[in-house]
Amino acid sequence: MQFPAELRYSREHEWVRVEDGAAVVGITDFAQDQLGDVVFVSLPAVGSKVAALEKMGEIESVKSVSELYSPVSGTVVEINQAAVDSPETINRDAYGEGWLLRVAMDGGLPDGLLSADEYRAVVGAE
Amino acid sequence: MPGAPHVSSATPRQTALNPRHRAAGARMVPFAGWEMPLQYRGIVEEHLAVRRRVGVFDVSHMARFFLAGADAGAVIRRTVTYDVLAMEPETGHYSVACDDAGGILDDPYVYRLGPQRWMVVGNAARREVDLEALRAAVRSGDDVELDDRTEATAMLAVQGPQAASLLGALLAPEIVGRVEPHHTTEVALVGYKALVSRTGYTGEDGFELVLAAAVAAEVWDRLLSGGAEPCGLGARDTLRLEAALALYGNDIDVTTDPFEAGLGWVVSLEDAGDFRGRAALVGRKAAGRTRALACIRAAERGPVFRHGCAVLAGGARVGGLTSGGYSPVLETSIGMGYLPVEQAKSGTRVEVEVRGRRERAEVVRRPFYRRAAGSS
């Protein structure tokens, strides 16, 4: 299971990468593995506000549904329509093509996000 | 994100193949008192392997009763709605067992192995109920032996368009060719006695094997090395739902009768044979159905339909889904549920409520998926 060192992680199993001042967000390899085949994802509309640790959408696999929590606060500037149209992309490449949305952050990354090693310890403990 | 699966406090039973499942990296879950594989590589991948090639399922948790004796057939006839006494030896037939009110106790598959030898395969969760029903049907003086061999045997389902060629490579090909759909025969499989039946629960061509538990792992290994994809309960559920096959405890139970479940074809009322629930079923048939199990398909890709989702027509609730899921072949949500007879007709536009949102859907003809003609 991969946890790239350059990413930050939330305890709700999302990852964040800061790119040109915006946060790119997705779900972790651990999350996609736990879910199994992802068949539906519901994301906030472009232009809407998201807040750290608050619900922003849903992700659903053949067997279960989970809520998505935003790891950052800000305004949604882009969603990955390819992942919405072909949710299996999230299973195949959770940190790459399976990214979910791009958020223009209000300020910087919130406190409390985990490093790869810290996140690995969290999921190892689950 | 999902938490740990619920684990029952009672220690679940393990099938003979449990070590094989663990070695293959299966995700194990408690199911009807057994610890069973939910999935190996992934539900969709396993599902499509069965639709396109061949998969193998451990279905050893299913209850297996063997009956022998001059009155064994009569005992089964008193238990189930289908006229099993009309069955030829070496054939199998789907059936239901009902209570006195005509409610469904279980939907066992009945095999006539020989003139006086039978096997009844029931759902794992209904094993005690089935056993009790069979015992209750025995009359004093009956010549019948009833043997629950669920633990002593294992059961494998080999399903998919390549099932016949795979089994043919392990058996003699002419034996596989001889076992026509819904037929069963006793053969030597890699040197061991086995029952091979051309039956299944996936909507594909396929076979079910019943063999001694002690040799199950060897046969499993041979099937896998022959190219069969190991498949778990997850794919078993999505496959049976695409084929619109009822799941006991979801689509049928004691509160439903065979007619409204679309299973009137296994209720034989023409023969003189008496069976439990007959009088009630005669009455229910005469009265006609007020509701029917309908197949419902989402108009577009969206959230997955689940058991319990409300079904609305014209904005009013008309029923609920008894089964729901994602169809890997259709790539949309599908489900089944009881609707008033008027709305249960194909073409009816409905809405399915998923977590407060109403998704457009339509009643369609059953099944959702039918294998191409010519592929037996």
Image: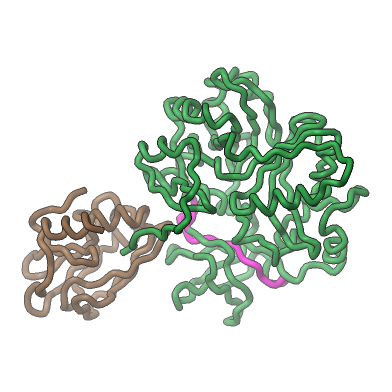
Chain colours: A brown, B green
Residue B188 sits in quarter? top right
Residue B338 seen in the figure: yes
Quadrant in the picture for the C terminus of chain B? top right
x%, y% of residue B290? Answer: 76, 71
Q: Residue at x 59, y 34 (%)?
A: B153
Note whether B348 is above or below A85 in the view shown. Answer: below
Q: Residue at x 22, y 57 (%)?
A: A125
Does the magenta segment cover residue B330? yes
- Magenta stretch bounds: B326-342
Q: Looking at the picture, tell me which residue is in the foreground, B293 or B136.
A: B136
Q: Residue at x 37, y 40 (%)?
A: B22
Q: Looking at the picture, tell me which residue is in the foreground, B145 or A20.
A: B145
Quadrant in the picture for the N terminus of chain B? bottom left
Residue B244 sits in quarter? bottom right
Q: Looking at the picture, tell me which residue is in the foreground, B16 or B314.
A: B16
Residue A13 sits in quarter? bottom left
x%, y% of residue B299? Answer: 51, 65
Does the magenta segment cover residue B10? no
Count of numbered circles in the view: 0
